[in-house]
Amino acid sequence: MIFIPLKELLTAIERLKVFFLEKIGQSQEKDLITKDLQTSTQDSVPNNDVSSKQSGYSPKIFKKSIHIYSHLDADGLCSAAIIARMLERKGIGFQITILRQLELQYIQNIAEEQQKYNRFIIFSDFGSGQIEFIEKYFQSDDYIILDHHKPEFESKKPEINHVNPYYYGIRGDDEISGAGVCYLFAKVMDSRNQDLAYIGIIGAIGDMQNNAEKGEFHGVNKVILEDALATNQITVEFNLAISRTKTLAYAIAYTLPIVLPKLTDSLSNVELFLKKNQIRSTDELGNPRTFLDLSNLERKTLLNALIKFALVECGMNPKKSKELLQNIYILNDFNEKYKISDAREMSSLLNACGRGGNSSFGIAALLGDEDSLKKAIEFSKSYKHEIFLGVNRARENIREYEFIRTVYEQSINEKTIGTICSILLHSGDLIDKPLIAFADSDNHTMKVSARADKNLIEQGIDLGIIMRKACQKIGIEDPAGGHPPAAGAKIPTKKLGDFIAIVNDLTGTQMKK
Ligand code: C5P
Ligand code: C5P
Ligand code: ZN
């Protein structure tokens, strides 16, 4: 057993449970019955029933119908999936909408919807950074927030309906994800929801929280992992971090945890590499082999050859190249039944769904719906290639400033810019400054995605604060923010120059502190 100081957070979640049950409490009025489970499409999600097909539950009568709003990335989809299954098990109907971000215009619309239709709103994986506007536009407290983004004022204790680990001394950027917070809530609601721990782990991996040595977790994530291990949903293995279920060539080209220029996204170069190292990519019958088909000796040869390639051909530093070898969180059920190798592969599948406008398939896939999983796999096929194309294009458009680098490439869209920025930062020797990426959005605005390496965070860089302050300085109302290593904003295109200059200055100030 490990000891993690969780008591205060759990007490807040217990209070939230009482608040929530009171709010949605059962009623005898027939016309207030909630609709069957459904997901809706406010922004990017096609209409698709998440899980009512396999649930077979009969809805009870509740005072309010519930609408879950969550973020479009892997952690956001995991958060929504956990809440969905928890509600479904309680016989509570709901609707899910996935948003690219909880923007001001959405908050206004949701507040209106809440009042007009007597809805109860659940915000997951966002909400803390937007609390000022939620409180401003909502006419009642018929909502809860389950978030892990750093609030602007950590010392100001939140209302009962708002849970965030930072208020209890727990970091949301690496100790617990949005899905982790939702998991704890689901488990407090009903201990049987312990079987959703694996989703909490996938969310944390989507947010890159397994960044302790050897790919291990920190803090509360360790407790969630213990739950997933105890229920045999996950097995941890320290090995070459590569997909076990994809064909070997594809796995090397697309599923390694670090980018190896010339091998990543180039199946033909991977074939040459395998040949050179005398590892056959197909068996005697010509069928493609997977990592699991390799002998122990071949696995060792492959690992050594990849490390050598990283060091010699890519000029990578030894510490970075060692990331090839790390903990792999194998999803036992998905592995056997659906050939999804591990939590990292699942999180990238979810990102493909969320960012590609197919969130509902991702959520249903997470909850074990086979058809949705097949569709999600289909959608994700071209996604990785598109991402690496974007990474290469972006690489050619980097600009140097004193304390930051910026990148803008017209063809990269706002839903993938965050992922591209993350990969780009970690794939070259760009870790000495924050990387601020821009993509065109609607109405003459730009989406901003900012990323900084761990070493800068240790030196005191907090991109969430920088984004928020820079937006305030150029007079933008729409809330910006995020985590110290990963944050975002939305700015008017005409303010781009001012924004970059301010972000550069603010970064310089934080670095000198
Ligand atoms: O909204 P949310 O917290 O779920 O999103 C965090 C985002 O930042 C994720 O898309 C994650 O991949 C990214 N991230 C990153 N580098 C980190 C931590 C998170 O790129 N060190
Ligand atoms: O959109 P992107 O992946 O760059 O976002 C990085 C992190 O910043 C995410 O955790 C996201 O939720 C957060 N963010 C935010 N407010 C914004 C934009 C992004 O809190 N306006
Ligand atoms: Zn998150």
Image (cartoon, grey):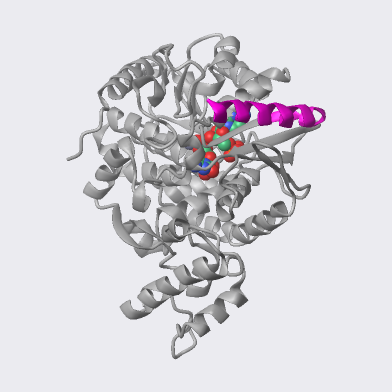
Q: Quadrant of the N terminus?
A: top left
Specify whether residue 195 is in view.
yes
Q: Indicate whether 356 appears above or below 328.
A: above
Q: Name, please, the residue furthest toward the left.
A: 1
**Compared with residue 232, is residue 181 higher up or lower down, i.e. above or below?**
above
Image point (45%, 74%), residue name = 305
- Residue drawn at (46%, 61%) of the image: 321
Q: Residue furthest bottom?
A: 284
Q: Main secondary structure of the magenta part?
A: helix
- The answer to whether 145 is drawn above or below residue 408 in the figure is above
Is 9 placed left or right of 442 in the picture? left
Extent of the magenta region: 490-513
Quarter of the figure with residue 237 = bottom left
When the figure is inspected, residue 34 is found, relative to residue 427, above or below; the finding is: above
Residue occupying image coordinates x 63% and y 21%: 469
x, y percentage for residue 497? 79, 31
**Residue 347 drawn at (x, y percent):** 47, 50
Q: Quadrant of residue 396?
A: bottom right
Q: Position of residue 190 (x, y in %)?
A: 27, 31
Q: Position of residue 89 (x, y in %)?
A: 34, 36
**Is 271 one of the magenta-colored residues?**
no
Q: Nearer the viewer, residue 183 or 424?
A: 424
Of 65 and 229, nearer the camera is 229
Asked if residue 494 is among those painted magenta in the image, a careful observer would answer yes
Whether residue 102 appears in this view of the structure is: no
Does residue 5 appear left or right of residue 303 in this picture?
left
Report how many numbered discs are placed on residues in the image. Answer: 0
